[in-house]
Image: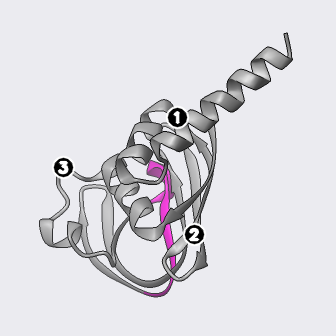
């Protein structure tokens, strides 16, 4: 498990959630619309979008697609329970992601643009410094 505390745009976190859950069957029109987000029930590893205005579009498999405007936050919990992340709005479409991520989720976080190669390098340097200082 890796602790995540990184600035991230709403769109990058949206891409992470899609890559983690439904990229293989999400309708292309939804994929290209920055206001469409996947949600999932709590029993299956919850995904919840907190927004000023939200409308349910369609349910496909275990994902409910919603159109959300003025997103304030998103809570993401993986099916395995190994990843729990929250995106909180700081200003407009910019925000911050905090929580814990599995190695599988790290790949999707990087793919979505939530974390960058520089973020990974800095994290590894920090961990190396912590491990050498405890020896």
View extreme (left): residue? 28
View extreme (top): residue? 135
Quarter holding residue 12: bottom left
Q: Earlier in the sequence, mark 2 or mark 1?
A: 2
Rendering coords of residue 3 (x, y %): 65, 41
Pointers 2 and 1 in contact (C-beta within 8 Å): no
Quarter holding residue 100: top right
Q: What is the distance, in whole Å, between disc 2 and disc 1 at their CAs?
A: 21 Å
Please indicate, yes or no, whether residue 29 appears anywhere in the rendered image. yes
Name the residue that disc number 3 marks: 24
Rendered residue at 65%/29% (across/down): 125
Rendered residue at 52%/62% (across/down): 8
Seen in the picture, residue 3 relative to 8 is either above or below; the reply is above
Name the residue that disc number 1 marks: 102
- Horizontal arrangement in the rendering, residue 77 relative to residue 57 (left or right): right
Name the residue that disc number 2 marks: 95
Tell me which segment is drawn in magenta: 40-53
């Amino acid at each position: 498990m890796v602790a995540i505390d990184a600035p991230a745009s709403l769109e990058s976190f949206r891409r992470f959630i899609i890559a983690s859950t439904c990229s293989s069957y999400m309708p292309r029109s939804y994929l290209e619309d920055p206001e469409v987000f996947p949600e999932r029930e709590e029993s299956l590893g919850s995904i919840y979008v907190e927004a000023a205005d939200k409308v349910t579009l369609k349910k496909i498999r275990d994902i409910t697609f919603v159109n959300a405007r003025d997103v304030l936050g998103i809570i993401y919990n993986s099916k395995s329970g190994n990843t729990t992340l929250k995106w909180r709005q700081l200003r407009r479409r910019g925000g911050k992601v905090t929580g814990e991520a599995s190695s599988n989720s790290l790949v999707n976080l990087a793919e979505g643009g939530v974390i960058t190669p520089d973020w990974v390098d800095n994290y590894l340097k920090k961990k190396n410094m912590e491990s050498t200082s405890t020896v």
